[in-house]
Image: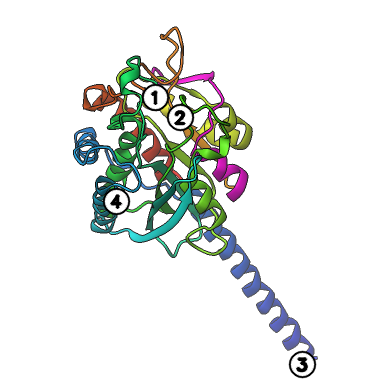
Amino acid sequence: MKKYYFIIASATLLFACASCRMNNNKSTAKQAEEAPAIKAPDFNSDSAYQYVKAQVDFGPRVPNTKQHIACGEYLAKKLASFGANVTNQYADLVAYDGTILKARNIIGSFNPETKKRVLLFAHWDTRPWADNDKDESKHHTPILGANDGASGVGVLLEMARLMGKKAPLIGVDIIFFDAEDYGTPEFYKGEHKEESWCLGTQYWAHNPHLDRYNARFGILLDMVGGKGATFYREIYSNQFAKSVVKKVWSKAEALGYGSYFINEDGGEITDDHLFVNRIAQIPSIDIIPTDRSSNEGGFGYFWHTVSDNMDVIDRSTLKAVGQTVLEVVYNEK
């Protein structure tokens, strides 16, 4: 009988210990779920503005030019100086007319060991032609791309600087894609294919910098510095990543940036996010302006013209986009 009671007592003790471990595990998991996200740092629009200007100061960043090479070195070194684990992805890409482009995708990773990741991206090259300029004599002039290219990169550089000082709970990969804006020009008489755009992104989507790379979601920043910009919900973004659209636009509204992030559907844009969605299958959205004040609509009077210079860049717009995306990232856990 003593032995029997001992076995009963031992079993009871073991069960109690097991229950304790289970309760502890549940408690730990619950605590992790309830743990507050890290407070997002304040986005410095003056700093972002200077990063935009630094790129523009190189001149047009068209692939196969010395300005392009110099700016690429600047961007990679900046990411490294902020503590990112930098990967350079070089590729020879074929343009719409058969031109071989010496392209470079630049990837900066924060918290590289963390499996829970978010992808932020923008293109850093500029349009070789001002093919939307009202002055036809300038249609073959490369653009400075202060808004179309440099603004998205400038915002992400400022975010990288802040992450280097205070890392979010999750891993973040910032990618500067190349050869986005070498798409078929308006004056070309041949076939205009969707795939002539976003060449660097298509290459990365087929050949990610890490084997089996994945992220919870991606956010593309394209032309995010223009004065009075309004960002509508882009159609492909809604199609592939509706929950991410809701997350970003809701956060913008909560921060007081509802006049920038308009909670209405916009247009359908062939942009880097489209190929990240289709090929890499990472649900991604595009923060890109829609100008409904123009008779023609589109991205502003300066889009793909020689007027896309620092005069069109507004610190307030940079702040609205940068702070919103920062808050989204730092609230992930």
* Residue 265 is a magenta residue: yes
Amino acid on which the number 1 mark rests in the picture: Asp
* Residue 262 is a magenta residue: yes
Q: Do callouts 1 and 4 mark residues in contact (Cβ within 8 Å)?
A: no
Amino acid on which the number 2 mark rests in the picture: Pro
Q: CA distance from mark 4 to mark 2?
A: 24 Å
Bounds of the magenta segment:
256-280
Q: Do callouts 2 and 1 mark residues in contact (Cβ within 8 Å)?
A: yes
Q: Earlier in the sequence, mark 2 or mark 3?
A: 3
Select label 4 or label 2 by which is in front: 2
Viewport quadrant of the N terminus: bottom right
The residue positioned farthest toward the top in the image shown: 295
Is residue 153 shown to the viewer in this render?
A: yes
Q: Do callouts 4 and 2 mark residues in contact (Cβ within 8 Å)?
A: no
Residue name at image x 37 percent, y 40 percent = 326
Q: Earlier in the sequence, mark 3 or mark 4?
A: 3
Q: Which quarter of the figure has residue 17?
A: bottom right
Amino acid on which the number 3 mark rests in the picture: Lys
Name the residue that disc number 1 marks. 131
Q: Secondary structure at mark 4?
A: helix
Select label 2 or label 3 by which is in front: 2
Q: Secondary structure at mark 3?
A: helix
Mark 4: give few (<14), some (14-19) or many (20+) Cα within 10 Å: many
Tag on residue 72? 4
Tag on residue 174? none
Mark 1: give few (<14), some (14-19) or many (20+) Cα within 10 Å: many
Name the residue that disc number 3 marks. 3
Q: CA distance from mark 2 to mark 3?
A: 90 Å
Q: Residue 78, position in %: x, y? A: 24, 53
Q: Earlier in the sequence, mark 1 or mark 3?
A: 3
Q: CA distance from mark 1 to mark 4?
A: 24 Å
Residue name at image x 31 percent, y 49 percent = 160
